[in-house]
Image (cartoon, grey):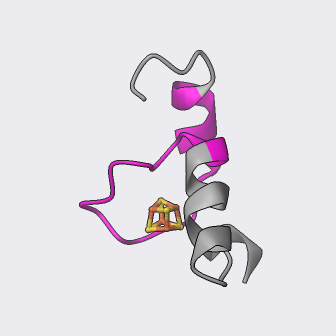
């Protein structure tokens, strides 16, 4: 997960405040996770 080439750039625009999340900055993982759980990432609320 940490080898995402866009991670640093994504983190600059990330509005999520849940600090311990390992998906932060890896938007594809983030969206897939919330979608699986019937929700949306923090930045889409
Ligand atoms: S929105 Fe959810 S999956 Fe994405 S970084 Fe925040 S807690 Fe993690």
Residue lying at the far front of the rendered structure: 36
In the image, the segment drawn in magenta is 7-28
Which part of the image, by quadrant, shows the C terminus? bottom right
Q: Position of residue 20 (x, y in %)?
A: 24, 60
Asked if the stretch drawn in magenta spans residue 24, the answer is: yes
* Residue at screen point 75% across, 74% down: 44
Q: Is residue 37 left or right of residue 2?
A: right
Residue lying at the far right of the rendered structure: 44
* Residue at screen point 66% across, 44% down: 28
Q: Is residue 21 visible?
A: yes
Q: Position of residue 4 (x, y in %)?
A: 54, 21
Residue 18 appears in which quarter of the rendering? bottom left
* Residue at screen point 68% across, 77% down: 40
- Taking depth in this image into account, of 32 and 26 the one nearest to the observer is 32
Q: Is residue 41 visible?
A: no
Q: Is residue 27 above or below residue 43?
A: above
Q: Is residue 44 above or below residue 1?
A: below
* Residue at screen point 55% across, 40% down: 26
Which part of the image, by quadrant, shows the N terminus? top left
Q: Is residue 8 above or below residue 33?
A: above
Asked if the stretch drawn in magenta spans residue 23, the answer is: yes
């Amino acid at each position: 997960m940490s080898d995402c080439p866009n991670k640093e750039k994504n983190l600059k625009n990330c509005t999520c405040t849940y600090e311990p999340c390992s998906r932060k900055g890896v938007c594809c993982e983030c969206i897939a996770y919330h979608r699986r759980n019937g929700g949306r990432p923090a930045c889409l609320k």
